[in-house]
Image (cartoon, rainbow, N blue to C red):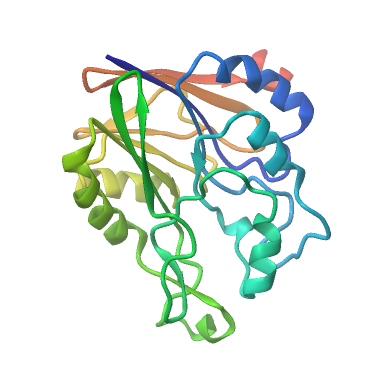
Amino acid sequence: MKFRFLHTNDFHGSLTPGTAAKLKPLRAEVDAYFDCGDVIKTGNLGIPLAIDPAWRILEDLSCTASVLGNRETHPLASAFQKKIEGCRHPLLVANMHPKGGTPVNQESMVIDANGIRVGIFGVMVAMATPRMKTSGAWSYLWEPPIETAMRVAKELRPNVDILVALTHIGVSQDRVLAEKCPDIDVIAGGHSHTVLLQPEKIGNTWIVQGGSHGRYAGVYEWEDSELTGGLVPLSRSDSQS
């Protein structure tokens, strides 16, 4: 049995209708589409004046799930909600929660793809932890992403055929996660803007990441614990390189 997916990360506001037109035929050929954060234009401390157009484009592309990036966060709860306003697909973040509260978004989800049960969860960089002096200014706190990922993976693994982690922690931390948590089959990453032309394997775990600013999208196929595929250039300069 095969599971095919599309992956993007770190658009930083460059998910335009033109880029979407290039992604649409790729999306039509796969079972799922994952985005791994920093999709909106507004920066970390900015507050958007209107709904970011990226959310509508992701909806039109039938995004299966995404993880938040640091651009989508803000110290103030009201500003954070403004940043994610318009998002219609699941935002999976297991290590972010309001102070003294429950998680802001879903931790995980399970989908059925061609009879394959695919478990998906998300973790992101810790923007504010209880030990940080700046944590008092934040409405939210973050748990360590790797430890959180290990906890969620242990919970999901018995119930799924494939386990996918959507991360926004950077490729160096993705590699640490792969070493510490062999329960994860695929880490679809973001944050470090790393161009991995083909999947990288560490132990039992495959890692993918596709640069930034809409230069590439990743198209991958999972079968019998092997991940094949790689990056597809979306911009003219990259297609000629």
Q: Position of residue 81 (x, y in %)?
A: 65, 64
Question: On screen, 178 above or below 133?
Answer: above
Q: Is residue 213 left or right of residue 162?
A: right
Residue lying furthest right in this view? 49
Quadrant housing the C terminus? top right
- Of residues 139 and 205, which is closer to you in this image? 139
Q: Residue at x 37, y 44 (%)?
A: 109
Question: On screen, 115 above or below 148?
Answer: above
Quadrant housing the N terminus? top left
Q: Position of residue 132 (x, y in %)?
A: 46, 81
- Of residues 110 and 54, which is closer to you in this image? 110
Q: Position of residue 76 (x, y in %)?
A: 64, 75
Q: Residue at x 73, y 38 (%)?
A: 14
Residue lying furthest left in this view? 158
Q: Is residue 241 visible?
A: no
Q: Is residue 151 left or right of residue 142?
A: left
Q: Is residue 148 left or right of residue 98?
A: left
Q: What is the quadrant of residue 42 in the picture?
A: bottom right
- Of residues 151 and 62, which is closer to you in this image? 62
Q: Is residue 41 visible?
A: yes
Q: Residue at x 24, y 54 (%)?
A: 150
Q: Position of residue 153 (x, y in %)?
A: 25, 48
